[in-house]
Image: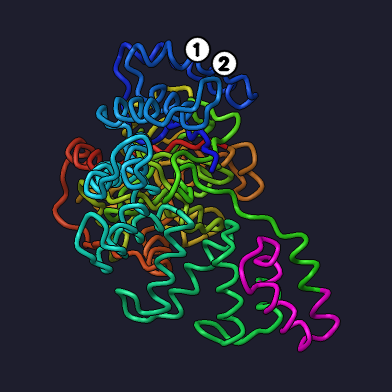
Amino acid sequence: MRHFLHFLFATGVALSASVVPARANFADAQAAFELGDYQTAYAEFLKLAQTGDSNAETALGVLYDNGDGVPKDQRVAVMWYRKAAEKGNPQAQLNLGIHCEQGQGVEQEDAVALGWYSKAAEQGYAAAEVALGNMYHRGRGVAQDKKQANAWFKRAADQGNASAQQNLANALYFGDGAEINYAEAFKLYQRAAAQGYGDSQYNLGVMYEKGQGVPKDGAQAYFWWLLASAREVPDAARNRDRIEKSLTPAQRTEAQTAARQWKPALAQANRSNLETRPGGAVSRGQKNEPDVTGTAFRISPTHYVTNFHVVHGCQRLRVSGTQSAERQASDERNDLALLSVPASSGATAIIRIGRIHLGEQVTAVGFPLLGIPSSTLSVTSGEVGSLSGVQGDTRFVQITAPVQLASSGAVFDASGNVLGLVEDKPNAAGLPQATGDIPQNANFAITSNALQGFLDANGVDFDTAGLGVATPSAQVAASAKDVVALVECWQ
């Protein structure tokens, strides 16, 4: 089976200072590979690998795995993977683990494979989490433990990995290391099916026909089996033809039209069906600098909250400079978005409960717009100037703390609790129609009440507290830095 390059720009692997200037050459090598100019790609990757660049070492391993630009040689591929893996490169660790598990270019050793999968999985690399879950599920290199397998599948599923979503859904559907839960299994199959995962599309058809976790709907079953049969999933065509006889002509036509127009959702950068092969598809035109930056705050070990306007239209997301993120939920009306990340350590925000008072102290903390050094937090202080937004909208409060146009950030009360999230700053030129004046220092924040409703709707646990003892803004800002993070978006 052919291998593909999956270049790592957002895996948390830090390059040494001496390697950073060579990134432009890495991009040239990547471009050459995508154009099929493997000899140029090999030459450029080799130059970078000689400087110790683990991404280039990994790329050389894939070239030798494929025989692209060089003779195919799995032993040499393993050598390059090992060099990068020992530097902590998670893709190399995954690929080396696969070779160890399959005995390709190296002695077959399940326990060694398990060790490399574990190292990559501990960095939050989703494909490695799936591989590690499979080892636990089958009892290879470790005592069989299906609950532990499901725990690894869940970590990868939360990142958007379709294989993990399918595996975890199977566990919930069949009660394999988990209690049977058709409703949750259905949701996971949906997420994987939306990415074009054929087995999940087939399983959705089964659940719609049987009414498991969802009301019975023969037309929906037919739709999903149409998609699954196009991917040649076993039994999909037989089920498609069988249920087609029970549908009206209108139902058949509608489902067939929808199936022709259906397109898979864009996969995550760290999403791949990589349990049995190294690498993954590279995103063409991927670049180092983000198109948009903004602010998020950690609400749980696996979730951040940010503004919808920051992450809308993003094909790739990163938090805190290293952590891949997935947009799990959105509320465009209230300008809110929920990001899921691999388990992270650190403080989590406390959400303000209770009445907000006119004139109370607030501190806005966030990262400036793209183009301003992103390592520097912007901290401004002010007061609650109004208990409603434009035209009396009570979802918002007006604050006097200065914020930038199209900015984002968390608003903390005097006790250090999150009082709200900065709303996209309105264009002052457009406000007179609504207000009759151009207000000075008129900025708005979606309140903690709306934020709590959004989190509750998406099943996220969070801590709350009322307004306590007031502390200076500088002290609030210092504690806020522990929960606030930079969000980077590639569109």
Q: Which residue type does callout 1 highlight?
A: Ala
Secondary structure beneath label 1:
helix
Q: Nearer the viewer, residue 289 or 105?
A: 105
Residue depicted at 28% across the width and 51% down the height: 343
Give the x, y percent position of residue 469.
13, 53
Residue depicted at 48% across the width and 18% down the height: 26
Q: Is residue 322 left or right of residue 237?
A: left
In the rendered image, is residue 123 in sight?
no
Q: Is residue 415 left or right of residue 199?
A: left
| Image: 393 above or below 82 | below
In magenta stretch: residue 405: no
| Image: 213 above or below 395 | below
For residue 39, which numbered disc appears in the image? 2
In magenta stretch: residue 249: yes
Q: Nearer the viewer, residue 55 or 10?
A: 55
Q: Are marks 1 and 2 in contact (CB under 8 Å)?
A: yes
